[in-house]
Amino acid sequence: MKKIRIAGAVFALFSVVLGAFASHLLRTLLTETSLHSFETGARYMMYHGLALLLVSVMQIEDKRWIFRFFFWGTILFSFSIFFLSLQSIMKVDLSWIGPITPIGGTLLIFGWFFLLIKSIKD
């Protein structure tokens, strides 16, 4: 599926761009903990971008649920971490976003579970 490939490439691209942004600009603006959290969000975005690229070429049927779980899980997980990490320099209380991170992580786990099941079945 073309949209799976595109989403994977976009996640990988954003991961590199955001990682460079963190290492060059944010290093001077964020605490060590916030910087580490931001880099975790970028790293997981890369992992799941690469996973989507891999899924796009795998010979398994009905990839839509794997795509949905990886796509929305990455959006919720990584972007909630980005916003939480940046709240100190944005001067906005975004602590309400905190519960979104584990929801995204759970969706990623479901994506890997579905990939495992599909790989065993097909």
Image: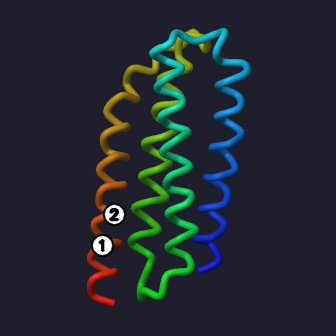
User: Based on the displayed image, in which of its 4 quarters is residue 117 positioned?
Assistant: bottom left
User: What residue is at 50 percent from the left and 73 percent from the top?
Assistant: 55
101 vs 81, left or right, is: left
Residue 112: which disc?
Answer: 2
Q: Is residue 92 placed above or below 64 in the rendered structure?
A: above
User: What residue is at 49 percent from the left and 56 percent from the top?
Assistant: 48
How many marks on residues?
Answer: 2
User: What residue is at 72 percent from the left and 18 percent from the top?
Assistant: 25
**Between marks 1 and 2, how big is the CA–CA gap?**
6 Å
Residue 6, how many percent across, how many down? 66, 66
Task: Identify the image quadrant of the C terminus.
Answer: bottom left
94 vs 10, left or right, is: left
Q: Is residue 40 placed above or below 27 in the rendered structure?
A: below
Residue 43, how many percent across, how many down? 52, 41
106 vs 42, left or right, is: left
Disc 1 packing (10 Å; few <14; some 14–19; many ≥20): few
User: Based on the displayed image, in which of its 4 quarters is residue 16 positioned?
Assistant: top right
The colour scheme applied to this rendered structure is rainbow
The amino acid type found where label 1 is placed reads Leu
Q: Are marks 1 and 2 in contact (CB under 8 Å)?
A: yes
Disc 2 packing (10 Å; few <14; some 14–19; many ≥20): some
User: Based on the displayed image, in which of its 4 quarters is residue 49 positioned?
Assistant: bottom right
Q: Is residue 34 placed above or below 47 in the rendered structure?
A: above
Residue 81, how many percent across, how many down? 47, 31
Task: Identify the image quadrant of the N terminus.
Answer: bottom right
For label 1, the residue is 116
Helix, strand or loop at disc 2? helix
The amino acid type found where label 2 is placed reads Trp
